[in-house]
Image (cartoon, helix red, strand yellow):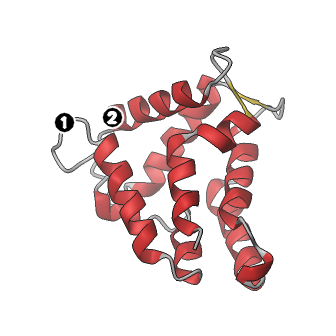
């Protein structure tokens, strides 16, 4: 399923259910992402799968097609968790988490994230999450340790 359709389906489901019935809708979104990233369905996210998914995410965030991701593009990415943050009245926390992640991604501090910076941030986050050091992420490692994922989920919790 295409990334756009996958996230749209999740958001339509999550917005239809009261927030009280969704104790961790952010984790549910992350689980959907994990299934999408794990292209071969073996329960392990390889570096190749993660970087391929990262490339498609980068392309979907770079709305103006200039080859760089701005903080505004990252914050307004409609296939991410911004709609869920708005629904849960957590927009300020979400925007803060995005700003912090953007600052981490933007290694040269030029107010833009290049594809190389984005790929390096994904790799660094994967290395951090890879607790057993096998060079791949189990689904629990991705859910519990992939930095951007954890930051965005934390922003959604009241």
| Mark identifier at residue 117 | 2
Tell me the SS state at disc 1: loop
Locate the C terminus by quadrant: bottom right
Tell me the SS state at disc 2: helix
Is any part of residue 68 visible from this angle?
A: no
Question: Alpha carbon of mark 1 to alpha carbon of mark 2: how far?
Answer: 9 Å
Check the image and name the residue furthest to the left.
Answer: 110
Q: Residue at x 27, y 42 (%)?
A: 106
Question: Which residue carries the number 1 mark?
Answer: 108
Observer-nearest residue: 153 or 69? 153
Which picture quadrant has residue 40? top right
Residue 20 on image: x %, y %: 75, 81
| Mark identifier at residue 126 | none
Judge from the rendering whether residue 49 lies leftward or rightward of residue 98; answer left or right: right
Residue 107 on image: x %, y %: 25, 36
- Relative to residue 73, is residue 57 depicted above or below? above
């Amino acid at each position: 399923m295409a990334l756009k359709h996958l996230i749209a389906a999740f958001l339509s489901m999550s917005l239809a259910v009261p927030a009280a019935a969704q104790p961790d809708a952010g984790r549910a979104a992350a689980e959907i992402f994990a299934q999408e990233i794990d292209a071969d369905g073996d329960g392990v996210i390889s570096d190749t799968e993660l970087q391929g998914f990262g490339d498609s995410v980068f392309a979907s965030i770079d709305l103006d097609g200039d080859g760089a991701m701005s903080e505004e593009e990252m914050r307004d990415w409609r296939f991410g968790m911004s709609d869920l943050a708005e629904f849960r009245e957590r927009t300020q926390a979400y925007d803060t988490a995005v700003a912090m992640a953007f600052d981490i991604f933007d290694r040269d501090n030029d107010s833009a994230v290049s594809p190389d910076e984005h790929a390096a941030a994904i790799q660094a986050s994967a290395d951090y999450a890879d607790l057993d050091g096998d060079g791949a992420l189990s689904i629990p490692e991705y859910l519990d340790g992939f930095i951007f994922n954890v930051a965005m989920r934390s922003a959604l919790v009241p």
